[in-house]
Image (spheres, helix red, strand yellow):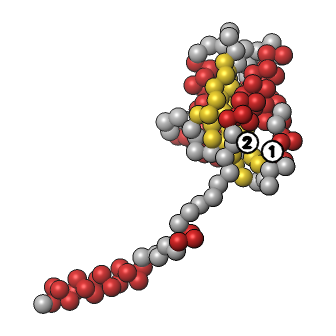
Amino acid sequence: MRLTMLLAGLAGIAALFTPTVQAESAVVNSRLMTIGIASKIAGAAVKSCADSGYQVSAVVVDRSGVVQVVMRDVFASRFTIEIAQRKANATILSGTSTSAFRKNRGDIRAELNEIDGILVLDGAVPIRAAGALLGAVGVSGAPGGDKDEACARAGVDSVLEQLEFVD
């Protein structure tokens, strides 16, 4: 009898601290980029680097770090794809460019680079529309992360006008 009362009391206390979910809060709306926009960003990033004489890969990931588009210059090493993806994932993790992330969290950079799929090197930037993080683009293959990042920015800049008018 005492055990039953104790269990009932504990269940009652637990119910007080269990959040109730209302129907309208059970659904989350989010902004997602189209494959068309992701393709334009990757293509413009690779072209920007090619115009400067660099053979690179560009990887666009969505806000969850899922790959949407991969573009590789015909002369870029296959390893540039993985590096670009890991840079883009670091941007998703931080919400900022990898160069800013590296500067802001240089104290734990080695630890961050141990996270599967993350690489904190210059060369990736976020993709935003109306203040929402849509994803990121990472670039690898140019002779320096600053050049990779410039190409990534060129990719995002190529669709900036379209992204600015998202409601």
Q: Amino acid at mark 1?
A: Leu
Residue 153 placement: quadrant: top right
> Dot 1 corresponds to which residue?
163
Which residue does the image show at 82% across and 30% down from the upper left? 154
Looking at this view, name the residue that lies furthest to the left: 1
Q: Is residue 151 above or below residue 64?
A: above
Q: Quadrant of the N terminus?
A: bottom left
Q: Residues within 10 Å of mark 1 (few under 14, many from 20)?
A: some
Q: Residue 127 bears which disc, if any?
A: 2
Residue 13 visible in image:
yes
Which residue does the image show at 70% across and 15% down from the upper left? 73
Residue 55 placement: quadrant: top right
Looking at this view, name the residue that lies furthest to the top: 75
Where residue 33 appears, as percent x and y from the top left, is 69, 42
Residue 71 placement: quadrant: top right
| Marks 2 & 1, CB-CB < 8 Å contact | yes
At numbered mark 2, what does the secondary structure look like: helix, strand or loop? strand
Left or right, 99 with reference to 52:
left
Q: Amino acid at mark 2?
A: Ile
Total marks placed = 2
User: Mark 2, mark 1: which one is toward the viewer?
Assistant: 1
Where residue 62 appears, as percent x and y from the top left, is 63, 41
